[in-house]
Image (tube, helix red, strand yellow):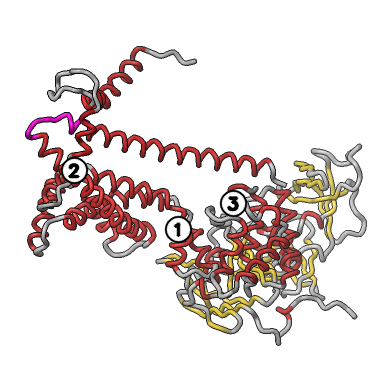
Amino acid sequence: MRRTSWFNVTSLTLGFAFLYLPMVLLVIYSFNSSKLVTVWAGFSTKWYGELVQNDAFLDAAMVTLKVAVASSTLATILGTMAAYVLVRGGRFLGRTLFSGMIYAPLVMPEVITGLSLLLLFIGIGLDRGVLTIVLAHTTFSMCYVSVVVSSRLVSFDRSLEEAALDLGCSPFDAFRLVTLPIIAPAVISGWLLAFTLSLDDLVIASFTTGPSSTTLPIKIWSAVRLGVSPEINALSTLMIGIVTVGVISASLISKRNAVKAQQDMQAAERGAT
Amino acid sequence: MSQKIFAPWDDPNEKPLIRFENVTKKFGDFTAIDDLTLNIYEKEFFALLGPSGCGKTTMMRMLAGFENPTSGKMELAGKNIAGIPPNKRAVNMMFQSYALFPHLSVWENIAFGLKRGDMDKRSIAARVEEMLKLTRLTKFAGRKPHQISGGQRQRVALARSLAKAPKLLLLDEPLGALDKKLRQDTQFELMDIQEGTGTTFVIVTHDQEEAMTVASRVAVMDEGRIIQVATPDGIYEAPNSVYVADFIGDVNIIEGTAKPTGDGVYSLAWAENEAPFMATSDVPFSDGQKAHLAIRPEKISITTEKPEDAKNAVQGSVLDIAYLGNLSTYHVQLTGGQIIKAQTANTRRLSRRSITWEDKVWISWSATAGVLLEQ
């Protein structure tokens, strides 16, 4: 066994402390029975009970969920199409410019993206509400999807598509029946990424939101300005729980598939006759 | 009833299945196929042979429809096929990487092409079963491609490309991924299936042994041109150039100047103070013309005594012996420094070898053993 040096232990502890200490504190205080956030007064789950009865928070959660599902789905469709064209389209005029431009929103400050979208929506006279947030979220998350999908497409064996064409598929059928099922894991993780990005976006949403379309991050932000309430701690703990379960199950599924595929491959080589 | 020899290329009334007429393919400035004209006939097993980058894969991809010729005419069964997309051609291809669909089972892979047509479900199932039986894969129908071995994957790829009963089947280095023993077995299997189904096969390979084994005719290519098209024995025994002679098998090339001595026999002066070699040739050479004599090592005999009646005999010393089990190849250095390879079959077990390193030996061959080539 390798000896654990003090240096390794220290850096590990420091790193994890930086990452998780704030969250651990938040979770602990969500079970605080006191109304004062920073004073511990015993264990209680009463804030979770109050949260369920708070209609304003529940409405905001519904809006957020709707926006996230709609915008991540739209972003996945557009981002996958863009990735496909960029990887498969071969050389066309302005290809480098186009592929550079699709990644620009990745590095663009969110404030600028939000502001420019706001100007656009005012310019074309679109009433701000759920629709404008969906459009705005699609805009900034589709480039993340296209990054994820195009990195999968680059390693995709082109002859699989040619085989599909050779066997009588139209180009669209070849994409639908062969390419899409094979790159599905990348498309799904692109969707999950877009979903998470939309879920916790505050800046762009607050630029493009309108009356009666308050998302959860906006709601939390405005509530916190009046003072941190234990209710918000409870809400945040729930969100952490949901995200953790999602991430762990996703990685477990993909790991199990990889292990199974490897076992199958070994079995096939052994049983070869 | 005498059996008819399969040679449609010699029959002027036979219509070719595939016709290339002055086909040129350019990628930018690079000419992959250079003004190529070629006929391939029905039921042929035609091999395109050449080093990598010679244009053989480009030719195959043009037949499949993945590339279009820059100029020239390409016909399949009398119809111009340039510009017709791959999914509208009665041509199927077996890919070098097999390109099996990893998310589909063996059964579904084979049925994939059939489902694209307007075949009913029961006929599809019957056809898939037939293909599974043909390629001995019935047991593995439910497995995914990563659950079977390399040899089985190769057979799935073959079954999938044959399922639609194409007029023409293209095989791109079909056995490249298999080990040597399996490759040899599979070569015979391929030939059986080709004969059984009567499909025209065009195979691309860089392995000359493979081309010689399976093909009815072989085209040797280099730099986008076809150098020679002939039957395997024609290519081997009567190459038309030093390039072909050298590409197929082992060969000794002796350079010299030819001189006609009548009756199609020529003498080749190849070194000063040495008697000229005698060789027959169907191609006429003029007096003093440069010529290359190409002789296969197995046509040269090696003896310790000077042979009495050999047309060509020359002395040298043994430089190297390559023992291959069934054969032994002797590298004999002549007094002028040239090295000639001579091969003998080891018909007896090696208890005592009569010839060994440094020995003075005579090598000899008849006048018809070699081929005189211009270039």
Labels 1 and 2 touching (C-beta < 8 A): no
Q: Residue at x 57, y 67 (%)?
A: B113
Q: Is residue B76 above or below residue B374?
A: below
Spot the residue most to the bottom: B13
Residue located beneath label 3 in the image: B145
Q: Residues within 10 Å of mark 1 (few under 14, many from 20)?
A: many
Q: Indicate the secondary structure of the residue bearing disc 2.
A: helix
Where does the image place residue A41, in percent across and percent down from the top left?
18, 18
Q: Are marks 1 and 3 on the same chain?
A: no
Q: Nearer the viewer, residue A22 or A97?
A: A22
Left or right placement of residue B71 versus residue B370 in this view: left
The chain under label 1 reads A
Q: Are marks 1 and 2 on the same chain?
A: yes
Q: Indicate the secondary structure of the residue bearing disc 3.
A: helix
Q: Residue at x 68, y 65 (%)?
A: B291
Q: Are marks 3 and 2 on the same chain?
A: no
The chain under label 2 reads A
Left or right placement of residue B352 versus residue B120 in this view: right
Where does the image place residue B315, in percent across and percent down from the top left?
82, 49
Q: Which mark is drawn over residue A216?
A: 2
